[in-house]
């Protein structure tokens, strides 16, 4: 495995350079052990495609999404306005992120606070790289595998992005199988709205178990996700069903990086 | 004496429409209790949404059976109303079937009304079976117990009775036409009610006229009563679906509005040139409450949402929290909002237009904290609503009140938020370690 090349905005700024795109890593991508693998997979693809990018590194801070969804508008705006100051100071034009929550907040909620950027989700960015022939993709190890895709709420319903991740899966020569609830009717993994950080309310079942059962009905080899929180929830669900040895939960970026042996 | 029926009709019509106007005024007054909403933008898109979603029923057909049946009843409702126009003119002028000179067009219209009336009866029977025999999950949730269930069935009964009266009226009229009764000119085409004629055999024209007049009067009385029933029922959606889809959210579903009052505070906090000891001016207005604990704290569009809800439960059946047995039901959020708003409206009426604190509010007295915290903000309810209602926005506004006014978040969320405040991540990791992943194997 080659070493990752991850310049920071501060480094490039010192050299008088401006990257094509800022990679917004997000808290999960920075700190969560499972999500860090997604971050690295995405960086390996960026490195392979020789995309000029940078991260904020220690200058990045929580987008404020979980605070806002929990009802703490004050904390959200403190985070947002601070982040916007940093982003604007570096003259950032385009942002890519592997987290649909960061994506939604930066794309939709920052503009009203003075932060106007072109914000894309990593699945959109990867598809663009393919379309522009900046990278190629062959199925490799996923050829013929049954892959079901779980729509993250903040990518799908929240922002109407349903096709980019699916097209990437199809490019792997994999068999894309849909769950009974997909696209607009996709069932939440249970983590949104700050639920990730608390115990669920009393009920019959956890939401992630319900969703995992729907995924299992498709007899998948792999459950593909496009959100670090969905990934955690689905991974937990698969473990709960004791299927972790036969069914993998992987981010789209990991599928692509693995297919390319990166 | 000759004009007695006309005068009686005019009085009844006047009363019926008068009461309806009074109800509409109450509705307007209650909705205007809400806070301002910015909805004057993008008129073109708004008209398009109304045409597509309300007029075109585009989201109803996501569930094909209910959707098709609903379109039948909806078309029946709209088209048969042309007949109501004729009934009103006839009633006021003492004429009979005043549109009859339209000839073939009239025949086609009456024929179409009859076919639609029959289809409406079929659809309504299916709806009744779904509610009472098949007992679809979404119709038997806890919030549907009592009045909501009765209300739903009552509407179906009224619709069947109205359609049967319409067909009876036509059948006796047709029979009278064939008997050559005076006043009953040959007009109309009766593809459905002609099959009722055997039931009328043996009746002389006096009895037939009695039957025809009775059905005619009951039909129009029924319509006027139904019009006035709307305000007390979930059935207001037949009117409010139109404004509600017009004022529906245009921004991406994931975009939640930023509170301007908070922006001002945060900017002051971040501005190094602000005098840290400055006190607010003596005449400064009391700042708005953050978030919502009662209906007056919601936007008027959210209150319009509540009156528009017809309790179909598509939102609740798509809700991940509800599906997994949590208390939260987006439909209940809307029903509670309306019930509380009605209570506040009655309070206003009792106290000469000023609201007197009744010790109740939407939070806790209607919507529990447990419901609010069970939401994953996934937007499934918003997507499912056929008339652009946004239950999620009410949940989020109430969370804002809980967190910003009461500091009453669940403790795990308080931990998450203090982590964000202290180290810029929801977990207790140092911001300086944010890029360590690069060097970890």
Image (cartoon, coloured by chain):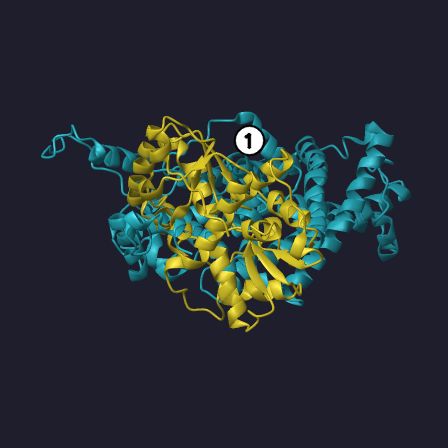
**Count of marks, rendered view:** 1
Given the current orientation, which residue lies at the most extreme front position? A2
* Chain identifier of the residue bearing label 1 in the image: B
For this rendering, which residue is in front, B326 or B213? B326
Q: Residue B242 in the image: x percent, y percent? A: 57, 37
Query: Can you say which quadrant of the picture contains the C terminus of chain B?
Result: bottom left
Residue drawn at (84%, 37%), measured in percent from left and top? B188
Residue drawn at (44%, 64%), measured in percent from left and top? B327
Q: Residue B252 in the image: x percent, y percent? A: 50, 38
Which residue is disc 1 drawn over?
B46
Name the tint of chain A in the rendering.
Answer: yellow
Name the tint of chain B in the rendering.
Answer: cyan
Left of A82 or right of it: where is B312?
right
Of helix, strand and loop, which one carries label 1? helix
Q: Residue A68 in the image: x percent, y percent? A: 36, 46
Instruction: Say if residue B335 shows up in the picture.
Output: no
Q: Residue A215 in the image: x percent, y percent? A: 61, 62
């Amino acid at each position: 495995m080659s070493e990752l090349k991850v310049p920071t905005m501060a480094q490039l700024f010192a050299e008088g350079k401006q990257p094509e795109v800022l990679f917004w890593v997000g808290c999960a991508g920075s700190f969560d052990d499972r999500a860090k693998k997604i971050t690295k997979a995405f960086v390996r693809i960026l490195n392979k495609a020789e995309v000029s990018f940078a991260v904020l590194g220690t200058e990045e801070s929580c987008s404020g999404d979980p605070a806002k969804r929990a009802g703490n508008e004050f904390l959200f705006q403190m985070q947002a306005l601070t982040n916007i100051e940093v982003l604007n100071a570096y003259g950032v034009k385009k942002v890519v992120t592997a987290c649909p929550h960061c994506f939604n907040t930066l794309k939709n909620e920052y503009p009203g606070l003075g932060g106007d950027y072109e914000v894309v989700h990593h699945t959109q960015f990867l598809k663009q790289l393919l379309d522009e022939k900046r990278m190629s993709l062959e199925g490799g190890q996923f050829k013929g595998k049954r892959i079901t895709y779980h729509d993250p709420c903040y990518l799908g319903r929240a922002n109407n992005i349903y096709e980019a991740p699916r097209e990437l899966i199809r490019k792997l020569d994999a068999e894309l199988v849909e769950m009974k609830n997909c696209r607009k009717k996709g069932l939440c993994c249970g983590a949104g709205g700050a639920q990730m950080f608390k115990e669920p309310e009393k009920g019959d079942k956890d939401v992630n178990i319900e969703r995992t059962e729907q995924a299992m009905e498709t007899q998948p080899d792999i459950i593909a996700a496009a959100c670090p929180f969905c990934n955690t929830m689905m991974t937990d669900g698969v473990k709960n069903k004791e299927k972790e040895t036969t069914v993998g939960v992987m981010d789209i970026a990991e599928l692509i990086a693995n297919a390319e042996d990166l | 004496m000759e004009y007695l029926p006309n005068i009686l009709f005019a009085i009844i019509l006047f009363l019926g429409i008068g009461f309806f106007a009074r109800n509409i005024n109450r509705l307007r007054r209650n909705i205007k209790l809400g806070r301002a909403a910015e909805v004057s933008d993008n008129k073109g898109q708004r008209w398009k949404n109304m045409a597509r979603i309300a007029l075109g029923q585009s989201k109803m057909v996501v569930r094909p059976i209910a959707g098709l049946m609903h379109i039948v009843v909806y078309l029946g409702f709209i088209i048969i109303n042309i007949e109501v126009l004729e009934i009103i003119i006839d009633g006021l002028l003492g004429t009979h079937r005043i549109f009859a000179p339209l000839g073939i067009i009239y025949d086609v219209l009456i024929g179409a009304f009859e076919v639609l009336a029959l289809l409406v009866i079929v659809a309504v029977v299916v709806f009744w079976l779904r509610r009472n025999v098949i007992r679809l999950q979404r119709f038997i949730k806890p919030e549907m117990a009592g009045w909501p269930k009765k209300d739903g069935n009552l509407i179906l009964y009224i619709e069947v009775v109205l359609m049967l009266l319409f067909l009876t009226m036509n059948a006796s009229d047709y029979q009278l036409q064939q008997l050559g009764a005076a006043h009953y000119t040959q007009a109309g085409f009766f593809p459905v009610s002609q099959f009722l004629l055997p039931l009328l055999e043996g009746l002389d024209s006096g009895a037939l006229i009695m039957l025809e007049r009775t059905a005619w009067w009951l039909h129009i009385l029924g319509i006027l009563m139904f019009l006035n029933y709307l305000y007390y029922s979930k059935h207001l959606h037949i009117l409010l679906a139109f404004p509600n889809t017009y004022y529906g959210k245009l921004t991406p579903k994931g975009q939640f509005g930023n509170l301007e009052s908070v922006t001002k505070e945060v900017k002051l906090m971040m501005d190094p040139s602000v005098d840290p000891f400055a006190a607010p001016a003596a005449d400064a207005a009391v700042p708005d409450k953050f978030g919502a604990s009662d209906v007056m704290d919601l936007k008027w569009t959210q209150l319009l949402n509540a009156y528009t809800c017809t309790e179909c439960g598509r939102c609740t059946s798509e809700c991940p929290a509800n599906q997994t047995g949590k208390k939260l039901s987006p439909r209940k959020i809307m029903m509670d909002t309306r019930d509380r708003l009605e209570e506040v409206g009655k309070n206003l009426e009792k106290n000469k237009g000023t609201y007197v604190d009744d010790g109740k509010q939407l939070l806790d007295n209607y919507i529990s904290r447990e419901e609010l915290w069970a939401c994953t903000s996934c937007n499934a309810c918003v997507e499912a609503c056929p008339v652009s209602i946004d239950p999620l926005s009410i949940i989020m506004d109430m969370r804002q009140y809980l967190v910003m006014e009461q500091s009453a978040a669940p403790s795990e969320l308080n931990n998450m938020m203090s982590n964000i405040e202290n180290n810029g991540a929801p977990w207790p990791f140092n911001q300086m370690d944010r890029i360590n992943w690069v060097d970890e194997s």
